[in-house]
Image (cartoon, grey):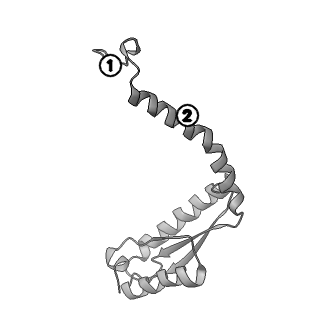
């Protein structure tokens, strides 16, 4: 399929059943895609709630400050650009104290109290796999 210089040589290609099926599948996907986009946009205009497990205290506090600043900058840029699929992003921050026990409590709080869509954070692995 490529010549000696690594460029595609389209003059020597033949249409195989596999190539035709790939083209049909790609065309069908493109034809159906606008319907999925309209459907997903119509779902909700509520903000996407993201739980941020931050090290504000404890041995990870120096890192936590920078994670919090970069998170705020990213959320600001995303929301100024129209959010994600038209939905604004809201970040809920909880301090885990760089402690495994507290880290587990924070994740539970995101799930039960704040009802976040997703949770991220923590640099230290012992906080992630804590009790």
Residue at 38%, 70% in the rendered image? 123
Mark 2: few/some/many CA within 10 Å (<14, 14-19, 20+): few
User: Is 113 above or below relative to 65?
Assistant: below
Q: Position of residue 11 (x, y in %)?
A: 39, 11
124 sits to left or right of 67: left
User: Is 112 above or below relative to 10?
Assistant: below
Q: Earlier in the sequence, mark 2 or mark 1?
A: 1
Considering depth in this image, is 120 or 40 the residue closer to the camera? Answer: 40
What is the C-alpha distance between the residues marked 2 and 1?
Answer: 24 Å
Task: Give the numbered dot on residue 2.
Answer: 1
Q: Kindly give the residue lying farthest to the left in the view shown.
A: 4
User: Is 32 above or below relative to 52?
Assistant: above
The reply to whether residue 80 is visible in this rendering is no
User: Is 99 above or below relative to 47?
Assistant: below
* Quadrant of residue 91 within the rendered picture: bottom right
Q: Position of residue 58 (x, y in %)?
A: 40, 83
* Quadrant of residue 103 within the rendered picture: bottom left
Mark 1: few/some/many CA within 10 Å (<14, 14-19, 20+): few
Q: Quadrant of the C terminus?
A: bottom left
* Quadrant of residue 100 within the rendered picture: bottom left
Q: Would you say the residues marked 2 and 1 are in contact, meaning their CB atoms lie under 8 Å apart?
A: no
Q: Closer to the observer: label 2 or label 1?
A: 2
* Residue at the disc numbered 2: 27
The reply to whether residue 38 is visible in this rendering is yes
């Amino acid at each position: 399929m490529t010549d000696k210089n690594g460029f595609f040589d389209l003059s020597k290609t033949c249409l195989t059943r596999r190539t035709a099926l790939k083209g049909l599948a790609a065309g069908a996907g493109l034809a159906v895609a606008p319907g999925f986009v309209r459907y997903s946009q119509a779902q909700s205009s509520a903000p996407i709630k993201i739980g941020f497990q931050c090290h504000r205290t404890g041995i990870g506090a120096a890192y936590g400050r920078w994670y919090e600043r970069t998170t705020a900058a990213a959320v600001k840029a995303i929301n100024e650009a129209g959010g994600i699929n038209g939905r604004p992003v809201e970040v809920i921050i909880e301090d885990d104290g760089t402690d495994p026990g507290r880290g587990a409590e924070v994740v539970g709080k995101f799930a039960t109290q704040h009802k976040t869509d997703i949770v991220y954070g923590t640099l230290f692995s012992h906080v992630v796999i804590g009790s």
